[in-house]
Amino acid sequence: MSWENNVRKVVPYTPGEQPKVKDIVKLNTNENPYPPSPRVAEALKSLDVNRMRLYPDPKIEDLVHAIATVYGRKDEEVFVGIGSDDVLAMLFMTFFNSNKPILFPDITYSFYDVWAEMLRIPYVTQPLDENFHIRVQDYKKENGGIVFPNPNAPTGSVLAQEAIEEIVKANPDSIVIVDEAYVDFGAESALPLIDKYDNVIVTQTFSKSRSMAGLRVGYAFAAPKTIKYLNDVKYSFNSYTMNYPGIVLGTAEVYDTENFRKNCAKIMDTRAKAAVRFREMGFTLEDSFSNFLFVTHEKVPAKKIFDYLRENHIFVRWFNKPRIDRYLRVTIGTDEEMEKLFAALTKLLETEA
């Protein structure tokens, strides 16, 4: 009997390409094109190298308190982890332990099924409608938990808070996770629901709107009892999830709400202009409430556009998956980066005319 018979084999998550070439336009992984707060640069200078020899604060009290303060919550309603992926994985381990299947959309963040497979959690995907929107009725059935992004990824569509609350109310015996990685780009947060329901958890991240994908900071809001269960699992898995620089720099970032809002506003302005340009060029797209657009061209296949742009050092995301293989997900960059994208698209489409 080979030792390989005991290996937990999974199909891993495929992250967006991180090109090593220079002089590229990188619009494929939904990173923020603008730098984080100037306070982060100042905090970086103040880091005490001697502190590196010590373990970091396992309770992450400074960053937890900063997030709670800025969002008007109590410290005991906040959980922090190494990016929202770490937070979500911890949530799956903590709360999805029923024999009943968890539910999430068929077109969604592609880490959900990876975690479910790895942790041996049964799941059933629920198909989005023809416009890639969640159907609330699909989540009013027996289940072992529910998770969905809002706004959705990779489509950018949004579910109204009233609809989210309808799902939460219909599932009092299940945890409902609302993954709000992109909420700061024009959507309404479900955060107020934690005051009414102890079975709803809202997750967010510094990776998109706060320009700190390279630092890895994610966080969750929930009722104190729910956060305690989550911390119990965290301390049983890895007590020191956030390193010392992450705590210091993350705390500096979260307090600068002015810079954060300014960057979000610039991205939303560029997104609106880009949507007009795409439509003028024959692309079809729904309104997006995220920092990307999900587009398809009426004549030119998405894979052909993807390959052409890549050859010209412009990177977007193409998903070779059912229902969405005709689409491209395009991160909103700076105005200058988007102009380079549209210049390249114009050349391609001229040859296809």
Image (cartoon, rainbow, N blue to C red):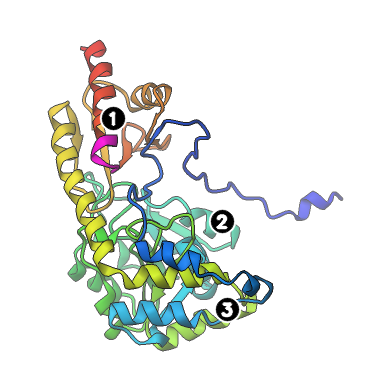
Which of 42/213 is in front? Answer: 42
Task: State which mark lies toward you, 2 or 3.
Answer: 3
Query: Is disc 2 placed on a helix, strand or loop?
Result: helix
Q: Which mark is residue 117?
A: 2
Q: Earlier in the sequence, mark 2 or mark 1?
A: 2
Residue 205 seen by the camera: yes
Residue 316 included in the magenta stretch of the image? no
Looking at the image, tell me whether mark 1 or mark 3 is earlier in sequence order: 3
Local SS, label 3: helix
Snapshot quadrant of residue 71: bottom left
> Toward which corner of the image does residue 23 lie, by quadrant?
top left
Image disc number at residue 341:
1
Q: Quadrant of the C terminus?
A: top left
The span picked out in magenta is 332-337
Q: Nearer the viewer, mark 1 or mark 3?
A: 1
Q: Residue at 18%, 70% (x, y): give it.
A: 162
Give the side of residue 131 with respect to residue 5, left or right.
left
Q: Is residue 334 magenta?
A: yes
Give how far apart the Cα atoms at labels 2 and 1 are: 37 Å
Q: Where does the image place residue 177, in percent across and percent down from the top left?
A: 38, 69
Determine whether 316 is above or below 114 in the image: above
Q: Earlier in the sequence, mark 2 or mark 3?
A: 2
Up-down relation of residue 96 to residue 120 (above or below)? below
Instruction: Tell me which amino acid carries mark 3.
Output: Val
The residue indicated by pointer 3 is 233
